[in-house]
Image: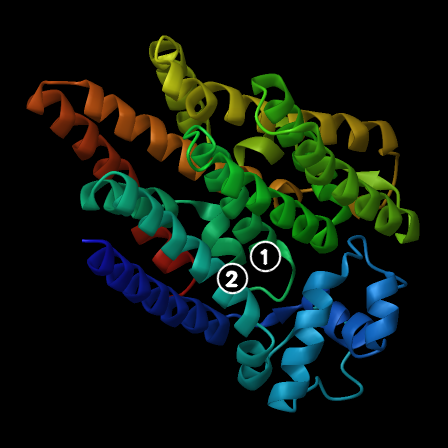
Amino acid sequence: MKQLYLFLAMLVFLFSCWVGLSLARNKSLWNDEVYSQVSTIGGHGYLDLIEGRVSEGNNGPFYYLVQKFAGQVFGYEIPKGVVASGTYVDQKAQLILRISPVVWMSLAIALIFYYFSINVALWAGLCAWLMTMSTFMVWSFWAEARPYSLLFLLTTVQSFLVLSCQDSSQRSRSLRGLILTHILLAFAAPGSIVQIVWVSGLFLLFGYGKKRDLVMMAMIPVFICFYYYNQTPKFPVTFPDAPWKLITANFPIERLLLVGAAGIYLWRKEACRLGAVFYPGMMLMAAMMMLLIFKIKAGPGAGYLMDGRHFIFLAPVGIIVSTFVLVRLMESSRSWVIQRIFLLLLIALAIPRIWKYLHLFNLR
């Protein structure tokens, strides 16, 4: 069965790449994508990118290095004279510049499907796939030449490693994986410091790992985050919407209610505490900490616009934890009627949203 699930996950990945490239072809580049490509990637060498000496709100080098390398592999750069104002329509640019973000998001989608299929059953993998495909932030940043799909993928990996640490036989390997993932997150975005610190604190709370492992999981990535943050240009911050909407854009209210209610129900099950209660709780606290910091920095007038994409790490957390508790609720119920009610409810919520997003993003 493992080979079958791996084969199906590969099909999900290939299908996701096809969908992502179709989105890329149909969507013009907007000014942030053009600015990053022209001014940051095209205007700096590899050493400048590694040192974080770029005029970006997020100057973590991971994304920019990959984009620069991809551009050299395909022998493409945006023509000189194109400025980051409005939109830029060029299907070749739209495809080439968005290849790596499409691959990252497609990997995350396939990984979510594979994790629940291999650890539970195929029906759980399909539930996870429906949950993922009915998430607005997935469609929004599936094909965008910015670091957000990379952060989505790395947070997905982080989430599964956290859940796998519930199994003591896998804990040592999962801790090593978390150390690497946290380092990659730190190189991807200095703002990842909040989820790195909170997850490390969660492991300290549960007594997972030796102190040496926890130091490597937290201190090294935190040092990297601080280095790049110190190199980041400081812009004033403005909030176009109510701050709480930045969280619910990634972790919708119905999923928050599901996780909250199921968390209370599953609290008595020791094996479910980490996945159903503590992990999403810690990540939501991390998001609220970010909101507090940004609100303190906020000022009047124009500035760095804060919106849901800056909290995209909550999107995979919401997908994975909602699927996790849904699966646990279905497994804990001995009534096939209740199980089918849960399944039909998921389908009833997911299918209309997927249909809506197909039309919204001109993919019909």
Percent position of residue 105, x then y: 48, 58
State which quadrant residue 83 falls in. Answer: bottom right
Is residue 17 placed above or below 316 in the rendered structure?
Answer: below
Taking depth in this image into account, of 173 and 42 the one nearest to the observer is 173
Identify residue type, mark 2: Trp
Percent position of residue 115, x then y: 35, 46
Residue pictured at 12% horizontal, 29% vertical: 340
Q: Is residue 312 visible?
A: no
Q: Is residue 108 visible?
A: yes
In the image, taking residue 56 as reference, residue 111 lies left or right, namely: left
Label 1, on which residue? 150
Residue pictured at 39% horizontal, 14% vertical: 270
Is residue 191 placed above or below 144 in the rendered structure?
Answer: above
- Badge 2: residue crowd in 10 Å (few <14, some 14–19, many ≥20): many
Identify residue type, mark 1: Leu
Residue pictured at 24% horizontal, 40% vertical: 124
Label 1, secondary structure: give it: helix
Numbered label tally? 2
In the image, taking residue 225 as reference, residue 327 lies left or right, namely: left
Q: In 3D space, how far apart are the residues under numbered discs 1 and 2 (Cα atoms)?
A: 6 Å
Percent position of residue 180, x then y: 63, 50
- Badge 1: residue crowd in 10 Å (few <14, some 14–19, many ≥20): many
In the image, taking residue 212 as reference, residue 53 lies left or right, namely: right
Q: Is disc 1 in contact with disc 2, using a CB cutoff of under 8 Å?
A: yes
Residue pictured at 88% horizontal, 70% vertical: 48
Is residue 338 placed above or below 159 in the rendered structure?
Answer: above
Percent position of residue 162, x then y: 51, 34
Q: Quadrant of the C terminus?
A: bottom left
On residue 104, the disc is 2
